[in-house]
Amino acid sequence: MDAERGKTLFAERGCVICHSVNNVGSNTATSLDASNMNIAREPFEFFARMWRGAPQMLALQQADLGYQIDFSGQDIADIFAFVQSREIQEGFTEQDLPDHIKEIIDNGPSTAID
């Protein structure tokens, strides 16, 4: 698992539209700061929680991005590594966000599922 790659994916794929890390992103969904996460540090529990939230996440992705985010198993493993790494998260800033992602956050991400 590669936490640096996970940081890039978290920003570029749009996870940050709903989740925040290091006070960067939205509070539409749970903060994924490693320092205060109540989510299990066990990867299978992390994946199970994603699975349980999948219908809502897919609807919000469609509403905010206009498409469903496509992740490989490696992508999810790398994002898991990022949400577990305080060190890598400390370097996560708004400069890591692509312009189109910043715009969605600035305009207010979707919070309701139609």
Image: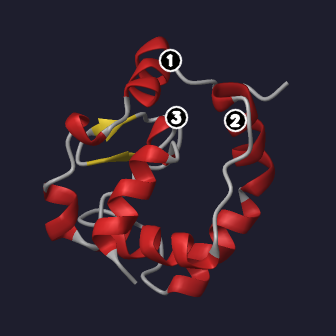
Q: Name above or below for residue 21 compared with residue 102.
A: below
Residue located 27% across and 42% down the image: 96
Q: Mark 1 points at which residue?
A: 108
Name which residue lies at 29% across and 62% down: 36
Disc ID at residue 60: 2
Circle 2 crowding by C-alpha within 10 Å: few under 14, some 14–19, many from 20? many
Q: Is mark 2 on a helix, strand or loop?
A: helix
Residue 14 point in image, percent of width and height: 51, 42
Which tag is nearer the camera, tag 3 or tag 1?
Answer: 1
36 sits to left or right of 29: left
Residue labelled with disc 3: 28
Q: Do the residues labelled 3 and 2 touch (CB within 8 Å)?
A: yes
Q: Report the side of 64 relative to 106 (left or right).
A: right
Toward which corner of the image does residue 32 lie, by quadrant? Answer: bottom left
Type of amino acid at the residue the image marks with label 2? Leu
Which comes before the other along the chain, label 1 or label 2?
Answer: 2
In the rendered view, does 34 fall on the left or right side of 46?
A: left
Query: In terms of depth relative to the viewer, which is nearer, 77 or 98?
Result: 98
What's under tag 3, amino acid-wise? Answer: Thr
Residue 1, image x and y in percent?
A: 40, 84
Q: How far apart in space, not on screen, are marks 1 and 2 (Cα)?
A: 12 Å
Query: How many labels, in total?
Result: 3
| Residue type indicated by callout 1 | Gly
- Look at the picture and state if 90 lies above or below 67: below
For label 1, count other residues whose C-alpha is less than 10 Å away and answer few (under 14), some (14-19) or many (20+). Answer: some
